[in-house]
Image (cartoon, rainbow, N blue to C red):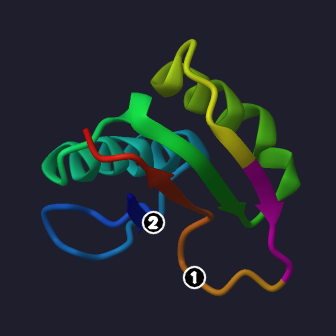
Amino acid sequence: MIEMSMPPVNPETGVYDILPIDVQARRVLDHLKACLEAAGSALDRVVKCTVYCSNPAYFAVVNGIYAEYFGAHKPARTFLCTAGWFGPFDLEIDCVALAK
């Protein structure tokens, strides 16, 4: 099993850029995909995701982008909106995946 958590950190600078939610979602999912592949897994091996978000108004945008990345594969998922969000970003996704 592989477990990881991804915020939308800039891979070139290591900092959190202030970005629109759609860009944050793509950045997080791109990182998640790359890290899973580096660990010997893939998005189609994900069994559970937890999506942490700062604002429930972002659900539709995040959900649409999430569906683009996972396609027909539908891992279990929880979408949580967190009061008193702590960071300079609005989204973090953690997942559990099976190794290949």
Q: Which residues are magenta?
A: 78-83
Q: Earlier in the sequence, mark 1 or mark 2?
A: 2
Residue at 31% x, 36% y is: 42
Secondary element at tag 2:
loop
Q: Which amino acid type corresponds to the residue marked 2 in the rendered image?
A: Pro
Q: CA distance from mark 1 to mark 2?
A: 10 Å
Q: Is residue 60 left or right of residue 32?
A: right
Rendered location of residue 58, percent (x, y): 76, 46
Residue 31 vertical position relative to residue 61 in the rendered view, above or below: below
* Residue 70: mark: none
Residue 97 vertical position relative to residue 12 in the rendered view, above or below: above
Residue 29 vertical position relative to residue 66 in the rendered view, above or below: below
Q: Is residue 18 left or right of residue 92?
A: left
**Residue hosting label 2:** 7
Residue nearest the viewer, comparing 76 with 22: 76
Secondary element at tag 1:
loop
The image quadrant where one finds the N terminus is bottom left
Q: Which amino acid type corresponds to the residue marked 1 in the rendered image?
A: Gly
Residue 64 vertical position relative to residue 13 in the rendered view, above or below: above
Specify whether residue 79 is painted magenta.
yes
Rendered location of residue 20, percent (x, y): 55, 49
Quarter location, residue 59: top right
Q: Does the CB distance between marks 1 and 2 fall below 8 Å?
A: yes
Rendered location of residue 74, percent (x, y): 63, 26
Q: Is residue 87 left or right of residue 9?
A: right
Residue at 47% x, 65% y is: 18
Image mark count: 2
Residue at 34% x, 66% y is: 9
Give the overall secondary structure of the magenta segment.
strand
**Among all residues in the image, which is located at the extreme top?**
72
* Residue 87: mark: 1
